[in-house]
Image (spheres, grey):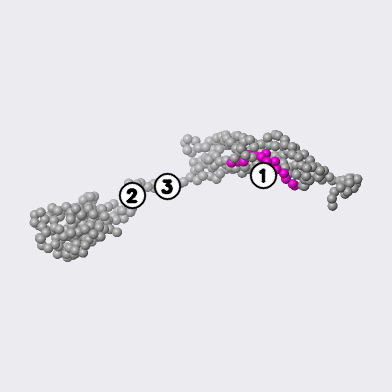
Amino acid sequence: MSRLGKLDATTHTPAHTEDFRMGYRVSSTWHTPLPSLFLLVPAPSPSLHQLWNPLELRGLTSATWSEVLKGLKGGGPSGGSSGGANGTSFSYTFHGDPHAMFAEFFGGRNPFDTFFGQRNGEEGMDIDDPFSSFPMGMGGFTNMNFGRSRPAQEPTRKKQDPPVTHDLRVSLEEIYSGCTKKMKISHKRLNPDGKSIRNEDKILTIEVKRGWKEGTKITFPKEGDQTSNNIPADIVFVLKDKPHNIFKRDGSDVIYPARISLREALCGCTVNVPTLDGRSIPVVFKDVIRPGMRRKVPGEGLPLPKTPEKRGDLIIEFEVIFPERIPQTSRTVLEQVLPI
């Protein structure tokens, strides 16, 4: 809320009055864009040192307001009792015409002539709208550009093409030890003129880390085709496991399917289990082995992705081979030996 400064009933000399008018004009111009607001408090005699803060209403006392109202009605301070430097006093008499009072306070109906000057051919004219000297009237305050130029039309924003996906096939041995893959791609590129296009080959290098899981994505930003109207797509490689002739992968574990005979399953056996690094681990089984049973060899699987120094397990999965026929003599023996 706007606030007006304190008013008192001291009087001023004509020289002080002219200073008052100029100060009131400057201060009012800064604090409100509406000329009608200038007429709200036409103080009869404010102190000169208070002219620069004319918006503080809270400090007014009832006595001060009484003096203001007297000034509005033409009473002003009591005649000449509070004289200025030359013994003269100042008071204002309201004549019933706010435009005349406005002109008397500001030296004319347009308070902005002092700061902006008059337009050609308008000197001495009776201007009802003090803001008409602005380029667009009152609307100019909201529509004026104030030195910041706007483009006539915003340029069209380029959109990036969808990612281009390729499979990256790796063996379990490469995941076990890590490897480097070099992938050759062909893409279109803009020439320096920004219009014509050339075909270009490029080698993308991928460092496959130990233990990377299937489905790991490697992204090369903006390596797709480039035109004058697009942002090149990202090239994405998705890790895929090559089928292995011995092992199957289960996360960081590897599964070795061991095929044994029925006699080995019943009587026990020793299974030589191969590893991904070319070793062979003999594992002895003395108990009965059931079809589909699993046994673990700890720490002989793939490296863990986040902690490559640790490894998963090597899992032996048994497949028991049953005979197609049993001779009659063997069947008689088995009937006597095997429990019911």
Mark-to-mark CA distance, 2 and 3: 17 Å
Sequence-wise, the earlier of marks 1 and 3 is 3
Which amino acid does the dot numbered 3 rest on?
Answer: Glu
Return the residue found at the far left: 87
Residue 170 visible in rendering? no
Return the residue found at the far right: 329
Q: Residue at x 33, y 53 (%)?
A: 143
Q: Residue at x 47, y 36 (%)?
A: 193
Q: Residues within 10 Å of mark 3 (few under 14, many from 20)?
A: few
Marks 1/2 in contact by CB < 8 Å: the verdict is no
Mark-to-mark CA distance, 1 and 3: 54 Å
Which amino acid does the dot numbered 2 rest on?
Answer: Asn
Asked if 46 appears above or below 272 in the picture, the reply is: below
x and y, in percent, of residue 261 in the image: 80, 43
Q: Residue at x 48, y 45 (%)?
A: 158
Q: Is residue 242 left or right of residue 143?
A: right
x and y, in percent, of residue 177 in the image: 63, 35
The secondary structure type at the circle numbered 2 is loop
Which amino acid does the dot numbered 1 rest on?
Answer: Asp
Number of numbered markers = 3
Residue placed most toward the observer, 195 or 333: 333
Mark-to-mark CA distance, 1 and 2: 67 Å
Place residue 124 in its image quadrant. bottom left
Q: Which residue is mark 2?
A: 145
Sequence-wise, the earlier of marks 1 and 2 is 2
Q: Which residue is mark 1?
A: 250
Marks 2/3 in contact by CB < 8 Å: the verdict is no
Start and end of the magenta stretch? 292-306
The numbered mark at residue 154 is 3
- Residue 296 is a magenta residue: yes
- Residue 157 is a magenta residue: no
| Magenta span main SS | loop
